[in-house]
Structures are given as C-alpha cells and as structure tokens.
Image: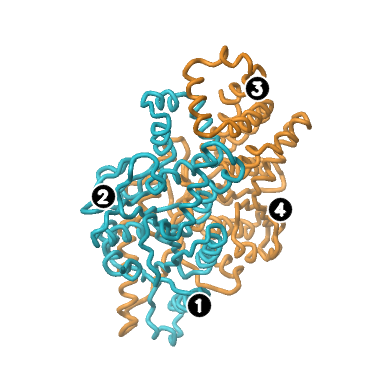
Amino acid sequence: MNLLDSKKVIICMGSGGVGKTTVSAALAVAAAAKGKAVLVLTIDPSLRLASAFGLDGWKGEEILVDHFSGHGKLYAAMINPKQIFDDFLAHSGADPKDLELILNNAFYKELSTSLSGTQEFTSLQALSRAHLNKKYDLVILDTPPAEHTLEFLESPQHIYDLFSGSVVDWFSQVGIKRSALFGILNKGTLMAFKIFEKITGSQFLKEMEIFFTLISKLRQHVKATSNQVRSILGSSQTAFILVTRFDYNKISESLRISEDLKARGFMLSKIVMNGALPRVNVETLSGTEKVFFEKIKNFIDFQSRHFKNLQNQWDQRVGVKTLPMIEYSEDEAIMLKKLANEFNHDF
Amino acid sequence: MSNIVKPIIFVTGKGGVGKSLFAAGLALNLSAKGRRVLLVELGSNSFYQNFLNIPVVEFDPRPVEKNLDIAIWNTDSCLRQYVTFYVKVEKLYDIFFENKIMREIINASPALKELAILGKITSGIREIGPPLDYDHIVIDSYSTGHHKALLMAPKGISKVFHHGPMGHHSQKMVEVIKNAEICEQVVLFKAEDLPTTEALELVQFLKDEFGSNPQLVCNQFLEIPNEISKSDRADLRFYQKYMEQQQINLGRINGEFLKIPYILEEKTGMELARALSEEHINELTRQ
C-alpha cells in the first residue's frame, strides 16, 4: 500500500536547504491528483511556492488551490507561530485579565516567536487541529528547519516540561510568598538563583517571574494538547519522510538520522534524495561537451556508489526515492507539477 | 576584491550552499599563510569530526594541523565558561549547572542561548574570559534565519534591558559586530533563484542592522560548455536552462563577488577542503 493512500498524516523532516517545502508541496499536488482532499501545512514558505500555487499576496490563511486540485482538493496553509500561540491561550479557559497580562509580558512576546522549540510546537499544534478536521483525507506537514532534525519530535515534551515543570512551581511559589522565599528554596537552588540574577540582572528575572506565575494556570490545557500531539506522532496512520539532498555528506547524515529515529521508536517510511543532477547520454557527444558530461557522469556515479554502500547498511524496510533537479521554468507551477509527477507511481 | 581577513569571520548563507566546506577551506587557506586560525563550529554534534576525520572536536581548541585549531561551541559550554569567569569561584558553577530548575530556566530564556555563543565568539576582542590566542576565528555559522537571530539577540536584549550585566555585555557585542575592522560576514549562495534572492536579502539586512558590507561568494557554479546551447537534444535542456539561470541570477548582483566552481571530482572531506583552499580562495585573502 502506498503512502498517499494509506496515511492520514505525512511529516516531512530534514535539515535546511534540502527542499522540504517543495517536496511537501509536490506530495500534496500528487495526492490531490489521486483524488484526495489534502492539506499542506508549511512554515515560512518562499514566495516562489506561493506563486506556484497561484497565491500572490497570500498571507498564509487556509486556501483551496484550484488549479492543482485535480480529482481531489488541494488546500494550503501557512503556520504562523505567534497567531497559533495567541489562539492557544485564547482557548485555554484562562481568566481574561491573566490573558492580557501574558500577552503583554516581554518574556511571552519573545517566547511566542523566537524561543527554540516554539516553531516546532506550534507546527504540531496546527497539525493536531487540522487532523481533527474531517474535511481532509490527508495532512502533509512541512517541518521548520532545525539544527537537529529530531528536535522536532522532542518539542512537545520540551514545551510540556517547561509549562508543567518545576520552574513554574518555583516561580509561582516565589510570586505568592516572596517573603517566605528562604523557607521554600533549598540552599543549592537559592545559590543558583543568585548566580543567575548576577548574570542577567534583576529586571530580566522579574519579567520571567510574572510569565511563569501566569502560565502555571495553563497547565491542564498544555497537558491535553501535548497528549493529543503525541498520539498523532505515534499513530500507525502517520508517516515520517526524511528529505535530503543527493550529496555525499547529506547521504551519510541521513543514515545517522534514520538510525536515531529508530532508537526513539519512530519508523521512517521513505527517504527522499532531492536535487540529483540529471544524467545525459555521453556516447553521442564529442569535444568539450563530451569531456564535461563525462565528468558529470563520473561525479554522479561516485555519489551513487557511496549511496549504495551506505544503503547496504540501512534498514531494508526504508525505501529511497531519488528526485532529479527539475528544469527551470518561469512558471513555478510547471516545475511543481513535474516534481509531483515523480511521485505518482511509488508513493 | 575586498579583503575579508579580519579577526572574526562569520560564514553564513542558505542551507545546503556549502558553508561548512567553505569555512574549512578558508581556515586552511589562512593557516597556510602562517596565520594562527581557529575554526569554530556551532552546536552539539560536530560535522567536522567526520568530515575532516579528526579524532575529537570539543569546546577547548585542538590542533588540526600547523597554525590551525578547531573547536565546537554550544550554549552550555559557553555559558559554563562565562559563569566560572564571572562568579570567580570554581565550585559555584557546578551548583548552578547541576540545579534542575536553573537548567530549565536557561533552556527557556529567550536570547540567552545566542548571547552565550556570541559572547564567547567576541570574548577575545572584548577581553573577557580566557584569552583566545588567534589571528582569526572562522565561524561556520548557522544558515540565514538562525544567523540573523544570533546577531540580533544582543541588539534586542540591549534595547529591553538598559541596565545590568546582560544589557552591558549585549551592547559591547553589538559594537564588535558593527566594527568593520574586526568583524567580517561572508554570505555564500548558489546561482539559483531562491538562494540568490535569500543572499541579497541577507546582505541588505546586515547593511541595515549592522552597517556591514558582507562579502558575497557564489559557490558551486556549474561551468557548462557554451557549445551545448546550440543543441536541441532533450536531455541537454536541463543544463541549457541551468546555464541561462545562473547568468541571470549573477546579473542581479551589484558589485564584486567571488565565484567558486562546482568541484566535480571524486574528493571529499579534507581533500576537498584543501582543493578549495589552494585553488579558489586566494582572491579573498591576498594582503
């Protein structure tokens, strides 16, 4: 059974610059061509993708992409972390007065957009909401670039720890009974606190204290969300795809990532090697052309050999799909369509 | 071509354009000229350890070859050194770092991670902490978005917190980044549509925010023989179009940039970095 037919969620992972967003979009186009109602959720897509979708001036709201809908329906939406965080708070059932304080807190303003882990968390939050929507047969998630590909899968736990962990308890206790500070803290924590204050200054700590005191009230809501996300990630109807580039070092890196994933209990469904230089028949060429394309051929063979060597060490259940670089066209939609065609058979 | 040989050299660009290889090539080039160079990678997992086949890469610099050392810096290690230096009492940092609550707070603090790393990079210049005895520090920095966040962290913090040590140090870091005598930004790109656009935007950003004049480097330029443009063979069309696009994208750039060809040889790791260093980087490092 191929992925586009059998899965409800496809998560595209990979390091920056490998073409995750384009591959996610092409997969969605391929799914819609098969008659699926599919949503592609992207984070910070390029203008070219918006333009390939025919969405000039698109702000990221969910939209039906008519000219790619095929027999099915192709929807696209852009993830806006700030907005998702704000919505998340609005639906948390917290006191409106507290909400206003949180939204105006300097710490929150930074946290909701720039803190590491928040992009991942909001992506999963958006995925979880879309997954519950019966309108879609399939949701494809383009993950944010991360230093480590796997950070993405750990983000629900990180955020959950942050909201429910001892930091929250600690600050909320300090907030309530400041005078009793010395009674609550053990000696080590007090010492650490003083060092932290010495490094950052008291103003910084004050803002943090307000923030953590407020979010301690959101604990239940965060817990419910984290559980929901974890159940989607663990579902057999969810597939993980690793997008990587047809390049010596990236090939080695993807081997390590697939092993790391396995160690965490997740199974990679496919590895997509993007951007291979197309092959040319050198037999019939002559002169400088022949020399050049022979060089290209040898180079591709060199990378392929390395790839085959590594593939022998890989888990045989992980299929690999190599995608060639697509011939440039002024019309981005044509390029996307060509890439989507590459997925028709084995996806 | 302008001279990029400054005490601190950041190498950045869109993901996948070859930053790490270029940074290694640049470091090798400078060290071969007799300069003492430290090549720095950021993060927790070393790329160079495998790539350059080095036994260990860690926080404290280790020699790779004559005049060239390598180190990997991340938030934890940088902050640890800073705290030790700041509180002056060796024992205290263990109390600080082994405290569970503190660990969570460090993880949650916006900009603190970036500040720790940038603080370490600029520590030699600011004369804080142990001296960094090098002529040049070459940083294999993050890709565009994260690199911006790294540089903007002290700017943001110094705006919000005027007083106290965080504000003070942040201000000093911004001064170092803005100082054209000290700090150079090398922006790598490929002559494809998106990477070129992203590089041009980054150059403008660095000019606007820090008054920098970054060095653009076009990497992996595919030198396709002109003859193929006349052919009507279908399997050559990709290369015909690619050639055309490369020229169009390079035409979008005002001013000078270095062009490095796609090295289509059966080389990898140190061999590849050395080829880059010896054959393609000299134009940038001539004094």
- Residue B211 against residue A85 in the figure, above or below: below
Kindly report the distance in space between the C-alpha atoms of the residues bearing marks 2 and 4.
47 Å
Kindly report the distance in space between the C-alpha atoms of the residues bearing marks 1 and 3.
60 Å
Amino acid type, residue under disc 4 in the picture: Glu
Q: Which residue is mark 2?
A: B53
Which quadrant holds residue B81? top left
For the N terminus of chain B, which image quadrant?
bottom left
Q: Which chain is orange?
A: A
For the C terminus of chain B, which image quadrant?
bottom left
Give the chain letter at badge 1.
Answer: B
Give the chain letter at badge 4.
Answer: A
Q: Which residue is mark 1?
A: B251
Which disc, if any, is residue A199?
A: none
Q: Of label 1 and label 2, which has the lower sequence position?
A: 2
Q: Which residue is mark 3?
A: A175
Q: Nearer the viewer, mark 1 or mark 2?
A: 1
Amino acid type, residue under disc 3 in the picture: Gly
Q: Which residue: 65% across, 31% down?
A: A211
Q: Determine the secondary structure under disc 4.
A: loop
Q: Which residue is mark 4?
A: A62
The 10 Å Cα crowd at callout 4, few under 14, some 14 to 19, many 20 or more, is some
Can you give x and y, in whole percent of width and height, for residue B221 in the image? Answer: 40, 71
